[in-house]
């Protein structure tokens, strides 16, 4: 039976640029969650407690990045984190997360009732019951951590930590196979991700822009590089949490468009010039690429997460024929460079 794939994240697939529902994460995080009309819904779905006591007051001033760290409380930070989760992938066609057919927010609210911030806890754990409701537990981070959480890399770290803990409610525990006591997943398998697996997958998806929150929109080039290097380091360290099917080391050159396309991405490419046939193509068959009057210098094939799978060097006019024998049925992105280093893109669908 042939598989059907639906992808709506990359603008180059649709000839329109599609972010998740956040298109400028830096500006988004500078606004108070308390001023957002969805906060009532979020606080109904997720209680935030401090040492077991329900938090009802959240003091916030804008821009959030200018707040005194003393006033930037952990309950406020976690409310902001939940707000990002609420919006982050709402415009993406489901299923886009490997472990659920819903959005990340819906998946979480169907499993836990809230967060309990507790003094004296290092890291966190899942879960505990309060008044018949299920909460995952986190520590009460200090001022340096709260300052860090004004940034996207801080908030995204909270998200992948939340998802890690909530994944335990699906019955995924840990092993010690990687040499860290209770700190490993037996395998990295995107069809069956464990708690560390969902963390790894989310970081990779933010880095490649598969989940695009507009990190390139307002951040400076220095800030963008900080985010990219942070995610690269996180991936290449956390890959050691898996004992089987360990993800490969990722280098920046392996990613087609780190953090996803910016607002002018589609305007800078012309899909119409690339002749690719047949497309879709049956697995194992040959396909042909041609760009009229152009010498194709190099072709790079990326998966839908933006990771480089294969590079083909070439220096000739006319048709170039490529086998799909080593590519699984899925959607791929072809990045094609001509002899003048001009870049063309096209999608390839293998069925």
Image: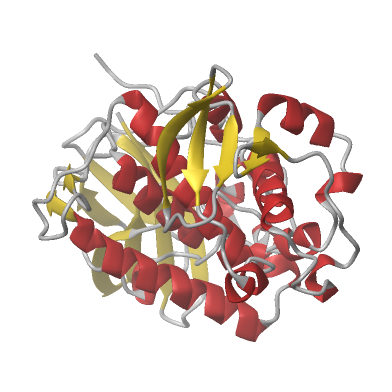
Q: For residue 267, what is the image quadrant?
A: bottom right
Where is residue 98? Give x, y as percent.
Answer: 38, 33
Residue 18 lies left or right of residue 179; in this view the side is right
Above or below, 91 relative to 83: above
Q: Nearer the viewer, residue 153 or 39?
A: 39
Residue 247 at least partly seen = no
At x 65%, y 31%, the residue is: 46
Residue 80 at least partly seen = yes
At x 41%, y 56%, the residue is: 204
Q: Nearer the viewer, residue 5 or 298?
A: 5
At x 83%, y 30%, the residue is: 40
Residue 224 lies left or right of residue 219; in this view the side is left
Q: How many marks?
A: 0
Where is residue 333? Give x, y as percent.
Answer: 42, 52
Colouring used for the render: secondary structure
Where is residue 15? Give x, y as percent.
Answer: 65, 46
Residue 92 lies left or right of residue 75; in this view the side is left
Above or below, 137 relative to 128: below
Above or below, 193 relative to 78: above
Above or below, 203 relative to 284: below
At x 62%, y 86%, the residue is: 222
Q: Quadrant of the N terminus?
A: top left
Where is residue 349? Give x, y as percent.
Answer: 37, 37
Q: Quadrant of the C terminus?
A: top left
> Which residue occupies the extreme top position in the image?
1
């Amino acid at each position: 039976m042939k598989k059907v794939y639906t992808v709506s994240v990359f603008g180059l697939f649709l000839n329109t640029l599609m972010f998740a529902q956040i298109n400028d994460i830096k500006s988004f995080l500078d606004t108070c969650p308390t001023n957002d009309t969805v906060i009532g819904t979020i606080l109904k779905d997720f209680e935030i407690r401090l040492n077991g006591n329900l938090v009802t007051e959240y003091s916030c001033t804008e821009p959030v990045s200018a707040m005194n760290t003393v006033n930037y409380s952990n309950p406020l930070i976690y409310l902001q984190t939940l707000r990002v989760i609420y919006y982050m992938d709402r415009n993406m066609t489901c299923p886009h997360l490997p472990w659920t057919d819903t959005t990340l927010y819906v998946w979480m609210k169907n499993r836990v009732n809230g967060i309990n911030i507790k003094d004296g806890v290092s890291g966190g754990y899942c879960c505990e019951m309060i008044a018949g409701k299920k909460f995952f537990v986190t520590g009460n981070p200090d001022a340096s951590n709260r300052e860090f959480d004004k940034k996207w890399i801080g908030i995204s770290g909270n998200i992948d930590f939340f998802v890690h803990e909530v994944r335990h409610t699906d019955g995924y525990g840990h092993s010690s196979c990687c040499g860290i006591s209770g700190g490993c997943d037996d395998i990295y398998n995107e069809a069956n991700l464990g708690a560390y697996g969902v963390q790894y997958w989310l970081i990779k998806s933010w880095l490649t822009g598969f989940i695009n929150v507009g990190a390139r929109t307002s951040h400076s080039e220095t800030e963008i590089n900080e985010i990219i290097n942070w995610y690269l380091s996180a991936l290449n360290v956390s890959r050691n949490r898996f004992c089987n099917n360990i993800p490969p080391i990722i280098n920046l050159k392996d990613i087609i468009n780190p953090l996803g396309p910016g607002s002018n991405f589609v305007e800078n490419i012309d899909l119409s010039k690339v002749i690719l046939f047949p497309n879709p193509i049956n697995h194992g068959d040959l396909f042909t690429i041609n760009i009229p009057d152009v010498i194709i210098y190099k072709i790079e094939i990326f998966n839908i997460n933006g990771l480089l799978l294969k590079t083909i060097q070439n220096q000739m006019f006319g048709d170039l024929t490529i086998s799909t024998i080593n590519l699984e049925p899925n959607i791929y992105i072809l990045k094609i460079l001509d002899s003048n280093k001009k870049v063309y893109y096209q999608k390839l669908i293998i069925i």
